[in-house]
Image (cartoon, grey):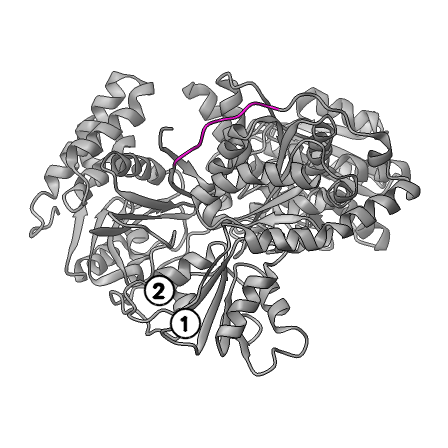
Amino acid sequence: MKQDIILAGVGGQGILSIAFVIDNAALKEGLHFKQAEVHGMAQRGGAVQSHLRLSDGPIYSDLVPRGEGDLILSVEPLEALRYVEYLRPDGRIVTSTTPFVNIPDYPPLEDVIAELRKLPRSVIVDSEKLAREAGTSKSQNMVMLGAASNFLIIKEEDLRGSIEALFRGRGESVVEANLKAFDLGRKSASNPGTRAL
Amino acid sequence: MKTEILLGDEAVALGAIHAGLTAGYSYPGTPASEIMEYLIRASDEGKKFKASWCVNEKVAYEEALGVSFAGKRTLVSMKHVGLNVAADPFMNSAMTGAGGGLIVVSADDPGMHSSQNEQDSRFYARFAQIFCFEPSDHQEAYDMTRQAFDVSEKWGLPVMIRMVTRLAHSRSSVIPDEPRAQNELRLGAAADWTLLPVNARRRYRLLLGKQDDMTRLSDESVFNRLTLSDDSRSLGIIASGIAHNYVLENLRGEASRPSILKISTYPLPKGLIKKLVDHVESILVVEEGFPLIERDVGGLFGLCGKTVKGKLTGHIPLDGELSPEIVRQALGLPRLEGAPAGKLKLAARPPQLCVGCPHADTFKALNKALEDQPSARVFSDIGCYTLGAFPPYNAVDTCVCMGASISMAKGGSEAGVHPSVAAIGDSTFAHSGLTPLLDAAVANTDMTVIILDNSTVAMTGGQESYGSGQKLIRMIEGLGVPKEHIRSLEPLPKNLAANVEILKEEIAYHGLSVIVSFRECIQEARKKKRN
């Protein structure tokens, strides 16, 4: 059993929090994991990605080999497309539809969404709307983790447990909002045959 | 002990703590910063050792050397180019030797994710003729750091741990071992530590005398593993550090396995390499960084009757970072077909100054002040403000190494560049800007130095800056810059016109001016507000 995931987004969008939640849940379940992340210059509003590998056996490379990725989990639609070549031919994309526009030549959003729809197994989620519904627009990353959780080899309860651990220090209401964001995201993509949007 | 989730950098830090660390020193720099971040967090939590950022890597190294002189265990960490700054004490510490275990961690950045070159620190270890570990995963990063202290104390020499970005910034689980106590105070002997020629000659012969023993240590190290295969004798692979992971990744599921030698310590394990070479017809060398092993194995004229492949033969690119794909191709395995990429042109998203960043306002004012001076050149430096090189600012003409903005602006001015402007951050100024500014003050060079004071080391995550605010102004005065040409401005959109005027006045002055552009980093201000 193994699963290779590319987490994608823009510096500051909370990719590393998603990684934290999955890493800790994986440790709890006794899985091996390696998770390569980007620090330094690129974190300043640039494209960031994290390679997250899960397996019940030893993992060698810290990077997902191109063509072996099972899942792209993206908090931003353009960023989801950047890593398609990492997916296996039947791999899946779970992405937010909320664009992060901090560059002058961002393509028209409908072109980006159309491109995503061409991929047979893409799940597109309006993370901004669901995050607001959960009580904080900052929880879009947890909405997306919730949506992707339908396809992860990790149990829902362990993911929720490590979300609690991540936000515990910031108070009960922050924990609640992020758990709600996770639940709304999970529900929005709970039927893998259908699209959330 | 309890399994921990750690970055590669953090595994090194925890290994050092558990090895009985007394003090750790560093200057921030990607990809090494997280070592000291971890040490500082742990020391704040009541662990009984000292951990601190220093003004630069040279100072950090010398502080560590003082700890070692006192017989206690110490670690000094830095990014690869930081070791250039610390090269003087580093090279000479191989002559003094180490009392207490002295570990230097140098974190290389192949592919230049956040650096200005991709130099390979293994050459520094060889240059100084000391032992070097190159971990391939997190557990090794922890275990090797612990063992490095033993090696250092046994041989009385500093030991290097060479990290690379991909391991430094990858997270995985580590099973730690029982911590051990710190050393007792045990002072070094003056004759060993006073490198007068009469002592240094003796110390050098001692160092040379240890080389064969260190090679033997490599041959016997549990971290170097030779697996001879009888499946096929045509190919043998030598892979070091994380390159070994990429080899194993690609051989997963392959029916026949070539012979493989994993190398994780230097000087090279000569005996193991010979066994592999004798067993196979051709050798593929896979290593992250420069072709150090490959050059040694091939020699000047190649290996008689064998072929050696790798970076020098074009089987692996000489530049950039390794990847599973690059190694796959070098192994002659078919390419993995992934999902088809679409046709939509994906706009690049390079890093950029944050919205509301003070540097953006400084660059806007500077560009405006220089708009009718096409011959003006801005010599910049290492930090977030280097991003002023990108549109829409296009405000930077050079970026070379820590502090070079001021010295290059002086040289440029003396060669005829006018106006000659230097742009440097507060922490970079404290690191390496004081000495060139003293030079420029003595010469009263016709140049304008702008110190972008955001009171933090922003690019690497907001570490403390050692020369900010009023203290910075006093430092500039102390170097001999005339008070009337030390100006301050607050980079805010509403101050644009006034700031342009100040800049214009000082640029027009034919002598040395220093302008401090002070406003706190927006990320740090936000962090403070949150807490």
Q: Which residues are magenta?
A: B175-182
Indicate the quadrant where residue B192 lies: top right
Instruction: Give the image location of residue B354, x and y in percent.
Output: 47, 38
Up the image or down, B162 lies above or below B522; here it is below
What amino acid is at disc 2? Asn
Task: Count residues near mark 2 (Cα–Cα under 10 Å), then give few for <14, some for 14-19, many for 20+.
Answer: some
Image position of A44 (left or right of B294): left
- In the displayed structure, B337 sits above or below B418; it is below
Q: Is residue A156 left or right of residue B384?
A: left
Residue at x 76% of width, y 25% of height: B187
Query: Tags 1 and 2 in contact by the CB under 8 Å rule?
Result: yes
Give the quarter of the figure containing the C terminus of chain B: top left
Magenta region includes residue B180: yes
Chain containing the residue with disc 2: B
Q: Which disc, if any, is residue B250?
A: 2
Question: Going by the picture, which residue comes out furthest to the bottom?
Answer: B305
Q: Secondary structure at mark 2?
A: helix
Label 1, label 2: how far apart the Cα atoms are: 8 Å
Q: Are marks 1 and 2 on the same chain?
A: yes
Apparent side of residue B329 relative to residue B95 in the rendered image (left or right): left
Q: Position of residue B53 (x, y in %)?
A: 62, 29
Could you classify mark 1 by the number of other residues whose Cα lies within 10 Å: few (under 14), some (14-19), or many (20 or more)? some
Q: Nearer the viewer, residue B162 or A63?
A: B162
Name the residue that disc number 1 marks: B331
Which quarter shows the N terminus of chain B?
top left
Q: Position of residue B151 (x, y in %)?
A: 62, 41
**Element type where label 1 sits in the image:** loop
Position of B242 with respect to B99 (left or right) is left
**Residue name at image x 54 percent, y 50 percent:** B221
